[in-house]
Amino acid sequence: MTTVVAFVDDLVFHAKLLETARQVGVDLRAVSSADALSDAMDKAASQQPALVLVDLNARADAVGALEMLRTTDNAVPVIGFFSHVQSELAERALAAGCGEVMPRSKFTRDLAAILSAAKC
């Protein structure tokens, strides 16, 4: 089964991610800190995740977590999502190593397709 790691600390959104992942047949591992993200990536080393999702509005340091991923020679695609009014945050995420950023509304609308694409 395809594994996706999600850096998210919003419990309501976490539940939405889990339910959508279940519906499309993806194993979602949610973490809420940079250390937990690092641990999840280490544990998944033998079966590397297909995708990492990062809530750029997380209370934890999302940009720091992205920088940590970049320093570990991580080749897993990373998609960050953010509040549409925070273009500076999107730019910082891209500079920190996020492969793609999108407003939360687009991410939410396309979530099933994003997770399904990770299975390929």
Image (cartoon, rainbow, N blue to C red):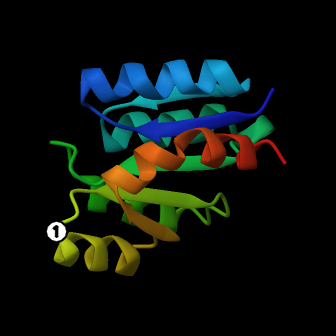
Residue 36, compared with residue 97, is above or below; it is above
The residue nearer to you, when weighing 106 against 49, is 106
Residue 119 appears at what percent x and percent y? 79, 41
Which residue is pictured at 32% across the width and 52% down the height? 104
Residue 13, compared with residue 5, is above or below; it is above
Which residue is pictured at 24% across the width and 30% down the height? 10
Residue 9 quadrant: top left
> Furthest-right residue in view?
120
Residue 11 quadrant: top left
Q: Secondary structure at mark 1?
A: loop
Residue under numbered circle 1: 86
Residue 56 appears at what percent x and percent y? 28, 54
Instruction: Count all numbered tags in the image, as a single digit.
Output: 1
> Furthest-front residue in view?
109
Around disc 1, counting alpha carbons within 10 Å, would you say few (fewer than 14), some (14 to 19), or many (20 or more)? Answer: few
Which residue is pictured at 58% across the width and 41% down the height? 41
Q: Amino acid at mark 1?
A: Gln
Which residue is pictured at 62% across the width and 37% down the height? 4
Quarter of the image that includes the N terminus: top right
75 horizontally vs 10: left or right: right
113 horizontally vs 5: left or right: right
Residue 32, compared with residue 67, is above or below; it is above
Residue 110 appears at what percent x and percent y? 53, 48
Residue 39, compared with residue 62, is above or below; it is above
Residue 66 appears at what percent x and percent y? 40, 61
The residue nearer to you, when weighing 82 against 68, is 82
59 horizontally vs 45: left or right: left
